[in-house]
Image (tube, rainbow, N blue to C red):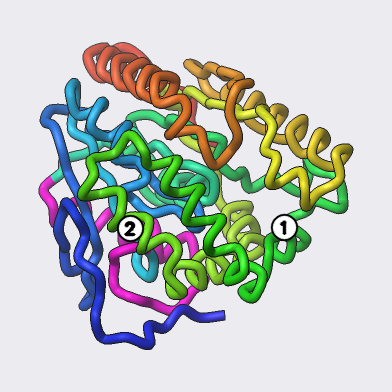
Amino acid sequence: MTNRSTSQARPAPPVGGFQEIDGHRLFVHRSGSGGPAVVFLPGASAIGLDYFGVQQAVARFTTAVVYDRGGTGYSEPLPLPRTATAVATELRELLRAQNVPGPYVLAPHSLGGFYAHRFAQLYPQEVAGLVWLDAFHRGWDDAMPPEADLATVERMGPDREQLEQMRPTLRAMYAELLAGFPEHMREALTDLKVSEEQIHVGIAERTGLTALAAELRAGPDVPDVPVVALTVVGSDPGGQALIPEGTVRAMLDGRTRLDAALVNAVSDGEQRVITDTAHHRLCFDRPDAVVQAVRDVVDRAARIRADPFRTPRSAG
């Protein structure tokens, strides 16, 4: 499936701007100063400015960057899905073009976990830490019941016709999620997220999950950097209406085990289980937990950089 815009007019973002990378424009918004810089990697169907609230809080103590990868959000259209390598190299070029020095603390949410892991595989010396926001793992299929493997997840969500019918419900949901945002941003972001093009983008990105996991399995684990994983186990009434309760519980248990394995594989890892929100609501309902996790990883990464005698374990 590909994402090709049928309109020449692109909506203007309410904040931020564009950076040309390899002949196409990427949306980027940078706030704050200092380092290590924190970079938020959106999930599927999400856009960079979904993380605006937590970005602004993080910008009080370090540089914080949100962006839309090529083909999504406010960035120019590209065929989707894309490889993890293409997305990771694009992000590195964007950060360099924006003069954001590494190493970086990567904060991936959901699908963004695949791209953050690939960035860490390709550029391990440019990763200072990870804040895992209920993000995907390459070992998903090893921890999930057969009815929730990646090939099934690719088909699990509603199709385009169903999403079109759900548009009024989606608009109401996004309006509620974005209620704390500045007024001029709420309407613009809601309009974009319920647009036909953005709905299509979310569907298209989800068609590549199996290939992304296979791409990552060919490379190493994440480098030995500080990691805080936020594991969300709260209920999602919308998702539970589509998936049997037993499968939902098995998926949450699987995510919990995957996050535990991630933090146990590094010298300075910590898992924090979040019980009072759902996967897609994490940064809206619990910005406090997200910002605290980011602050802790930034602080730990800064201490490590100041300690010349620390020898981290190599990725394996």
In the image: residue 96, left or right of residue 312: left
Residue range in magenta is 73-99
Is residue 83 magenta-colored? yes
Residue at left offset 21%, top offset 70%: 25
Above or below for 119 versus 59: below
Q: Quadrant of the N terminus?
A: bottom right
Q: Which residue is mark 2?
A: 68
Q: Is residue 294 visible?
A: yes
Above or below for 27 versus 304: below
Q: Amino acid at mark 1?
A: Val
In the rendered image, residue 20, in percent from the top left (x then y), is placed at 17, 69
Above or below for 269 versus 105: above
Element marked by disc 1: helix
Between 281 and 134, the one nearer to me in the picture: 281
Above or below for 288 versus 74: above
In the rendered image, residue 181, in percent from the top left (x then y), is placed at 29, 39
Residues at badges 2 and 1 in contact (C-beta under 8 Å)? no
Q: Quadrant of the C terminus?
A: top right
Q: Is residue 316 visible?
A: no
Q: Earlier in the sequence, mark 2 or mark 1?
A: 2
Element marked by disc 2: loop
